[in-house]
Structures are given as C-alpha cells and as structure tokens.
Image (spheres, rainbow, N blue to C red):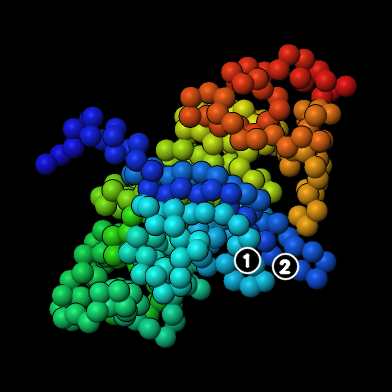
Amino acid sequence: MAETPAEQVKRRQRKVLEVRNLRVHYETPTGDVIAVAGIDFDLYDGETLGLVGESGSGKSTAAYGILKLVQPPGRIVDGDVTLDGDELVHMSDSNFRQIRWTKLALIPQGAMNSLNPTMRVHRQITDAIEAHEGKQDKETLRERVLELFRMVGLPQRVYNMFPHELSGGMKQRVCIAMGIALHPTVVIADESTSALDVVVQRVVAQTMLRVKQALGVSMIMIGHDMGLMAQMVDRIAVMYAGKLVEVAPVETIFDEPMHPYSQVLIESIPSLKERKPLKITEGITHDPRNPPPGCIFQLRCPYVMERCRSDAPPLRELLARHEVACHLYNDDGSLIEDATMEAAS
C-alpha cells in the first residue's frame, strides 16, 4: 500500500544516521594533520545529503570515518556515529562487518581500483552476498545479480566479463550494483562521477537517483560539482578544512548562500546564459597541523573581522533548516550592521 502524504512526512523526519563530533587525524612526524575537525550532522530517512567542498576539505575522510575504513597513519580521534540506534565508532570489528553492506554501504570513487581485476563481475557481487547470507543456490544468485544489473542499466553480458572489459561508466554501475546488493539503509557515494566524462556522469548520476528512489535508501553524495549536486540532493553540507560551514536545503543554499565560502563555490559554477569572470578565493589555506584560532576560513575570507581571528563561530540554525558557521549574521539570520564595512576597513 502506498504511503499517505502524512506518512511520508513522518518518515522523512526520522533520523537514520547521526554524526556527532567526528574527528579524524593523520599522524605525521611533525604533528597530526587534522582532516576532520569535529563535525555534526544528521541524515534522514529517504534523504540525499550532498557533502561538498574543495579537494582536501575532508569530505572523503569523513565518509571513511563513518565507515570505519580510515587506515593508518589515520585514526578516529573522537566522535559518535549512530545508525538506526546502533553506535558504530566503538563497535567491535566483527559486529561492524555484519553492518557494512547490509545497513551501511559504500560506492567508491575509483571503480577500477575497487574491482578485483582477476575475478569476473558476477563473482565479486555473489561473494559479498554469500559472505553475509551464507551459501546459496547458483541459479538464485544469478537471478539476483541480473536483477541488480537491470536496476543499474547493465546488459546481461556483463555477468561473465572481467572489469578491464568494461567502460568507465559500466564499471561505476557495477560498483553501484555491489553497493545496493544487500539493500542497505544508508549508501555513501564517494565522488562516484568525478573520473567520468560529462555524458557518462549524467548517466551514472541518473542511475543512482533511480536506484535510490526504487529502494528508498538514504544517501550521502560526496563531491565538488555544485551543478551536479543541485540536480541530485535534498540538502547540501558545505565542508572547509575539516569543518562544516553551512548546511541547508538545496534550493535555499543556491538562492541565498550565507557563508562566504559557499558563495564562492556557487559563483564558480559556469553559466551558459551570461559571461562573467571566473570567481576565485584569495589567500592560501592554513597549515592543517596548526589551524588558526577563530574562524577556519579567516585567511581567505573577504569579510573577515577582528572577532573572526579569535572566536570560532559555531554551526547554528539562523533560518529554518539553514545552519551557518559565520560571525556575519545575527541569530535571526540578518546581516550584522556594518559587518562588511568593518571587514573592508
């Protein structure tokens, strides 16, 4: 029976994933590189959240922290991650292995590097199924794999092929099929279209959207293509230097971006309707081993004030469902009087 509108609203208000104060560091001889600096966010039932930011902002590291896939010299320093009531960070590896794939799955960035070149495609999917569900009848497994292929738009001939025989887009769709093979609650797609040309990007993005709608999964999409995010996600979380600086519904953040970094990201999207100069951010990033006191964006912000150099702005809800970490605004979301004038001076 189809859900009523009231039931859909209630389901969309249920949190399936809660991330609190997640911190991930990478140890170096000269001090820890702070890759993720205490982020907090929620993912709701059936929602697609876009995690965006420039390269090195900590997007993928945050995802691997949630998945407990951070490898040495990286380590999870602090934080709690709760998935449908299960706390993940402190869970034993054996218990977490039962959750990975079945409740929490990854669609990796490099499809070729993620697929075993010596195994046929169907073996890579059936091995994951049998690892969680035990040995099964070969014909049953074949039908399950072919059904997954139909969902992601792959022809049956892919069943017996090796990864090197597939195009980039086909390999990426194999990874999508693997990610949804056990019907997880949450899927994390780590820049799944970044290594593809624009035509194939669109095909893969449409495949992920179609699969999400068919299965009703919640999804975190990681990337730096704001144009693609605008078409794919419900909310956007903007990340800079290991911190979340703005979280808002996709329509809101494109109509009225509040954080200076978000404004630069959106202004950098090429336009087919008007010719405009390329927007760039002045300044250089700080040493990730030694972040400055105060706002993490202060060295590149055109509106930096004296307060920004000493007080770190908290991520606070200024408008409905619109959270921003910036000293430029009052608690009601209005711009602080003369803030830009102070910055200019």
Q: Secondary structure at mark 1?
A: strand
Residue 214, compared with residue 304, is above or below; it is below
Residue 243, compared with residue 155, is above or below; it is above
The quarter of the image holding the C terminus is top right
Local crowd at mark 2 within 10 Å, few (<14), some, or many (≥20)? some
Q: Which residue is mark 2?
A: 27
Give residue 78's position: percent from left, percent from top.
60, 57
Tally the marks. Answer: 2
Residue most toward the left?
1
Give residue 176's position: percent from left, percent from top.
37, 62
Residue visible at 44% across and 57% down?
87
Give residue 254's position: percent from left, percent from top.
53, 30
Instruction: Please say if the residues under marks 1 and 2 sit with CB atoms less than 8 Å apart.
Output: yes
Residue visible at 11% across and 41% down?
1
Q: Which mark is residue 75?
A: 1
Whichever of labels 1 and 2 marks the residue nearer the N terminus, that label is: 2
**What amino acid is labelled 1 in the image?**
Arg
**Left or right of 251 on screen, residue 98:** left
Residue 317, compared with residue 22, is above or below; it is above
Residue 174, compared with residue 326, is above or below; it is below
Q: Secondary structure at mark 2?
A: loop
